[in-house]
Image (cartoon, rainbow, N blue to C red):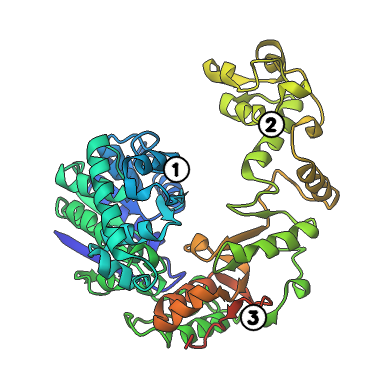
Amino acid sequence: MKRIIVPGPPGTGKTYHLINNYLKKEIEEYKTSPDKIAYLTFSNAATNEAKKRILSAFPTVKDFPYICTMHSLGTKQLNIDTNTQLLKDEKWNAFKNFSQICKDLSFSSEFDPYTETTTYKNDHMKIIEYARCKKLSIMDAAIELDKHYSVDTWLTEQIDADLKSYKKQTGMIEYSDMIKQFIEKDKCPPLSVVFLDEAQDLNPLQWEMFNYIESRCDRSYVAGDDDQTIYTFQGATPNIFINLKGEVDARIESRRCPRVIHRKALDILQHVENRMIKSWLPRDAEGQIFEDQTLDNINFSKGEWMIIARTNQMLNPIKAHLTSLNLRFDSRSNVVLSNELLEAYQVWHRLNQGATVGSEEARSVYKVLNWNMGHVEYGFSSGKSLDAVDLVDLDDLMLNHGLKVTGSWEQLNFKEDTKLYIKSLLNSGDDLFKPARIKVSTIHGVKGEECENVVLYTGMEKIIHDAALRNPDPEHRLFFVGVTRAKENLYIMQPDIDDYYNYIPGDPIL
């Protein structure tokens, strides 16, 4: 088996190189069938971007069936129904009833569709999942997570034992179980070639799955950057990528970072102890960095913006500020104008302009219609009557699907604060049919992305700061990723809340 490793700092075109060089060679020179090629990514966002690029590069190829995340490949090959078989959300209540020691514990969790991972708010489950991903004992996992001093490890071990028994009896699984089953049941599809992008984010358990897939292939291509290992809290470790053996094809010229931002990024890397030394050249432009910024002295009225912070909690005052300025922004947790509401607005407008829409699009409107308010006839508000149709227009909805209102978007059952927000956006000249100019996100949520203007909020909560004092490398890497999203202008914003600790990019945390 031949392995080619493509290391490279941010913006050096690793993904482009994988697709337009190596994948092209596989398709055109080696004549490898697309159904014999797996292109694996870390996140759904990366998968969607890879699909777009690959289909654009190879317009005559009808299908690449294995462009996906590792989780998606596993669930597909094992024929797992993630809605019924995956242990998440309310399904934890059944486990609590099963386990006597868990009756008084909360197992609330958040499933992240971006990475297809579950983040547990329960510290016991954090330790258990981390132990699985890194193939550690419960005690060793607690020590690595800095929780051995605050969490009863004996109780954690008992919960883990009960959980294993419960899953064995019910057939329920978690994603870590899926990886083990994928390997044990030999569910790898018949592949000749495997690509792996963003390899630095894999945890040891995911590496085991990749190595299993790779062992069944003739060639593999692995791209990544150890300096961008930011999922250490989920078990990712830079060491595996750093020590990977194979033919190296390094990328060194950044198409993104101008000279001043490149220098700031290098300043941060000086404080990362465990890393691969690599060459990195900036883009031929100077760029700008604006220090000590506040929300009030940054003009967001024009251009493309990315505003990023360490945690979602720190983004809340930023979202409130943008809303007060009647500025629209995109955020995975934007509760004022969600993507669902925006879709409903757009579809409703198109319907009233005489357009024909798909049934799923029409259903997005029905989610904000209410029979009590006279929007639809009783029994139609669920949109179930649309199941049997492909395309509908406004007349069809009124004749066959219970619709009783037409006209202004204000007919839709939006909350009053949402309606006021939309009115202010429209009055300010915003086009709600165009993507938002401003993106608000955690640093984790924008890895792999870039923007002309980046605002980096450098605060961190006390618990994160205290952990960084003991092990600063993960935080240095995280802010390195934040700095290197900027293509032109970087605005460094300092915290103004007493409970937050400030980190100045380029300075050591200690």
Q: Which residue is mark 2?
A: 368
- Residue at 35% across, 59% down: 197
Mark identifier at residue 89: 1
Q: Quadrant of residue 358?
A: top right
Q: Quadrant of residue 401?
A: top right
- Residue at 59% across, 75% down: 459
Q: Is residue 359 above or below residue 103?
A: above
Q: In the shown orientation, is residue 472 left or right of residue 403?
A: left
Mark identifier at residue 288: 3
Label located before the other in sequence (2 or 3): 3
Q: Which of 401/56 is in front? A: 401
* Contact? badges 2 and 3 (CB < 8 Å): no
Report x, y in % for residue 97: 36, 40
Q: Is residue 509 above or below residue 347?
A: below
- Residue at 24% across, 51% down: 161
Report x, y in % for residue 316: 66, 61
Label located before the other in sequence (1 or 2): 1
Report x, y in % for residue 345: 71, 36
